[in-house]
Amino acid sequence: MIDRSHALPLAAQARELGISRGAVYYEPAPACQADLTLMRRIDELHLDFPFAGSRMMQGLLKGEGFAVGRRHVATLMKRMGIEALYRKPNTSKPAPGHKIYPYLLRGLTVDRPSQVWAMDITYIPMARGFVYLAAVVDWFSRKVLTWRLSITLHADFCIEALEEALVRFAKPDIFNTDQGSQFTSADFITVLKAHEIRISMDGKGAWRDNVFVERLWRTIKYEEVYLKAYDSVGEARASIGRYLNFYNSRRPHSRLGGHPPDVIYFNQPLLAAA
């Protein structure tokens, strides 16, 4: 897929393939099949029980016949980039140099496209491995503006998706994320500040702040990801891309009066007429 002898620079090849630059240079340690099976089931259980931490997750897995220790469950959850979603005491501290911004959406009426964008990352299982999916979403229309796949959780693929969205669409007033290190990194924050976008971050582990994007991940996984067994990153990218085109342009959305996101994003009057 990546040709290191080609005249086209590696960064340009990665951009054309829709993968992060970091993925070109990173050599991942392969997970064993037993762990991949566990991770796939943890991902499914997390969608159904987002409040389950490693202790509860171990109990759920044990009830299904999986013999696995709590520490191993916690390790896999960390590798997948997921944690229990519930209101926690504010005892966590940002990484050195990483500022945490306040949540700006509480009580805010979102009534137009490009008023608020949100971004998040989710785990995507494949037949023999896994990748991470990052997406920039318009809060009002639910449209997936841009997205990227990566084999790592480095910030670069999130920055690439953000930069593409800012080129293709009118910039938002507010950009909302969770407190993940990708979104608190100096490089990511610099892009938002350069465009004079207000920064909003969910309360750490607060499911109410994150529920909108969690619903999107549930939809994508149950209607696309869990129905497939991708053999490669390229296959995952192509199949997810086809689904997201369908999601944006054709899939009816009950919260949008039965219209797909593109109709609402590009032609608001149809929502009022519904």
Image (tube, grey):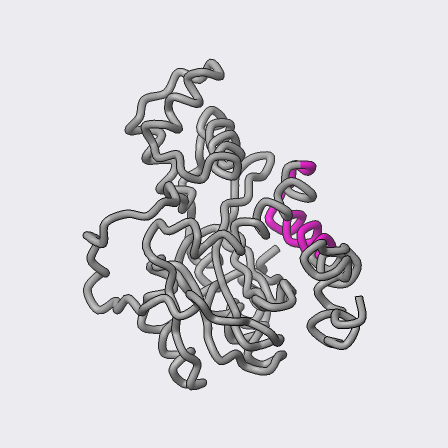
Work out whether residue 231 can be spotted: no
| Majority secondary structure of magenta residues | helix
Range of residues picked out in magenta: 227-243
Work out whether residue 241 can be spotted: yes
Residue at left offset 50%, top offset 32%:
45
Residue 86, x across and y down, in percent: 36, 45
**21 versus 172 height, above or below:** above
Residue 235, x across and y down, in percent: 67, 48
Q: Is residue 98 magenta?
A: no
**137 versus 123 height, above or below:** below
Quadrant placement of the C terminus: bottom right
> For this view, does 241 lie left or right of residue 75?
right
Residue 101, x across and y down, in percent: 31, 69
Residue 255 figure quarter: bottom right
Along the viewing direction, whichever of 167 and 61 lies nearer the viewer:
61
**100 versus 198 height, above or below:** above
Residue 143 figure quarter: bottom right
Residue 42, x across and y down, in percent: 47, 32
**267 versus 57 height, above or below:** below
Residue at left offset 38%, top offset 38%:
77
Residue at left offset 61%, top offset 76%:
112
Along the viewing direction, whichever of 198 and 242 lies nearer the viewer:
198
> For this view, does 256 lie left or right of residue 34?
right
Along the viewing direction, whichever of 104 and 220 lies nearer the viewer:
104
Residue at left offset 43%, top offset 23%:
60
Q: Is residue 240 magenta?
A: yes
> For this view, does 58 lie left or right of residue 235?
left
